[in-house]
Image (cartoon, grey):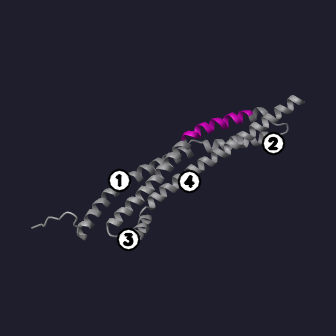
Amino acid sequence: MVKKKEEGESPSPSERTEAVNVKRAAFEKIREKSNDELLDSINTLEGEFDDSGIIQDIKKYTMTAKAAMDSDPMQLQVLANMQVELSMLIQRMSERQAMAGYNERAAEYQLKKSQESLKIIFVEGGDAIGVADSKKVLETESEFYNHNHAKYLLDNINLTRRATDKTIDTIRSKLSYEKTVEERG
């Protein structure tokens, strides 16, 4: 005959272990699905960014602009065309930059949520808080990888964007300077 628990009576170690195992199994199901979806999104964006040819086009137009600036006399029409081309590439890159930011924030949230959920599960399972902290870090390697990968992609896109913006500013300055020189001379 099963004895009914009194209110306020704590569960036995086996009951606690069973409850923790049920929570852990449910958490792992949700976690795996979330991680897979996030990784798919990150990989898709990375593939689109690499396959779109934006990076190759930026390199090509930047080299063409540099050659036009270094020529004597400076090729102003080529510079003006490269400024337009680079500006259009920046517009194409903006959507990918926004999506990379979204992925990075989602990956960071997923990492923190997984770590805190695991910590609670470990503490409820009888682990000390310090042990639970160590275990949660070890158990969330895939989330850390996703966050690190998303952060790298966002940083790479942001760096490319800043460098391209500087190139456009340099071209603009050169064109402005040449126009001023023409007007005076």
Does the magenta-highlighted stretch encompass residue 103?
Answer: no
Q: Disc 2 and disc 4: Cα gap in Å?
A: 34 Å
Foreground residue among 170 and 75: 170
The N terminus: image quadrant = bottom left
Q: Earlier in the sequence, mark 3 or mark 1?
A: 1
Separation (CA) of disc 1 from disc 2:
57 Å
Kindly identify which residue carries mark 2: 70
- N-terminal label among 1 and 2: 1
For label 4, the residue is 152
Q: CA distance from mark 3 to mark 2?
A: 67 Å
**Magenta segment, which residues?**
80-95
Question: Which is in the foreground here, disc 2 or disc 4?
Answer: 4
- Residue 149 lies, in percent from the top left, at 52, 54
Q: Secondary structure at mark 2?
A: helix
- Up-down relation of residue 22 to residue 42 (above or below): below
The residue sitting at 66% across, 36% down in the picture is 87
Specify the label residue 30 is tagged with.
1
